[in-house]
Image (cartoon, rainbow, N blue to C red):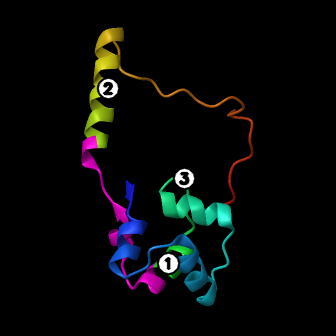
Amino acid sequence: MKWNLRVQAAERGIWKSAELRRMLAAAGLEMSQGKMSGLWTGTLTTIRLDDLDVICHVLDCQPTDLLVPEPEKVSARTRRLEQHSEANGSTPRVTPRLGAKDDRPAPPL
C-alpha cells in the first residue's frame, strides 16, 4: 500500500505537517511530532483506525484516498516466492511458532 497523505493534504492547500497536526489536534487527535513525521513522510508502519477516521474527517476524504493499492508489489512478491520454491524444489511450509503446544487449555464454549 502506498500512503497518500501528502497528496491529499496538498489538494486541500495544506503544505506543512505542523499545519495538519494543528488541525488534527483541533479535531481531538493529539499526535507526537515523531508520529506526525512518520505520517507526513509515509514511513509509518501502523495506523490506528480511530486515527485514520479523524484524518479522513479533517481532510474530508475516504480511507481509499489515503491508502492506494500497489498490485505490482504483490506480483513481485509472488514471483520471488515462486522463484524461491523452484530453486529449492519445494513449496514453502508453514512452521508452528515455538511454544505452540497442544497442552494449552481449550477455549471456552
Image mark for residue 55: 1
Write down the residue under mark 3. 45
Give the x, y percent position of residue 1.
37, 54
Q: Confirm whether the magenta stretch covers residue 30.
A: no
Taking the image as shown, residue 72 lies to the left or right of residue 7, namely left
CA separation in Å, label 1 and label 3: 16 Å
**Residue farthest along the front direction in this orientation:** 15
Q: Is residue 1 above or below residue 99?
A: below
Which amino acid, by three-letter code, is at mark 1?
Ile
In front of the other: label 2 or label 3?
3
Q: Is residue 18 above or below residue 71?
A: below
Write down the residue under mark 2. 80
Give the x, y percent position of residue 26.
61, 89
CA separation in Å, label 2 and label 3: 22 Å
In the image shown, does 26 or 13 lie closer to the viewer? 13
Taking the image as shown, residue 78 lies to the left or right of residue 103, namely left
Magenta part of the chain: 56-72
Judge the density around disc 1: few (<14), some (14-19), many (≥20) Cα neighbours within 10 Å.
many
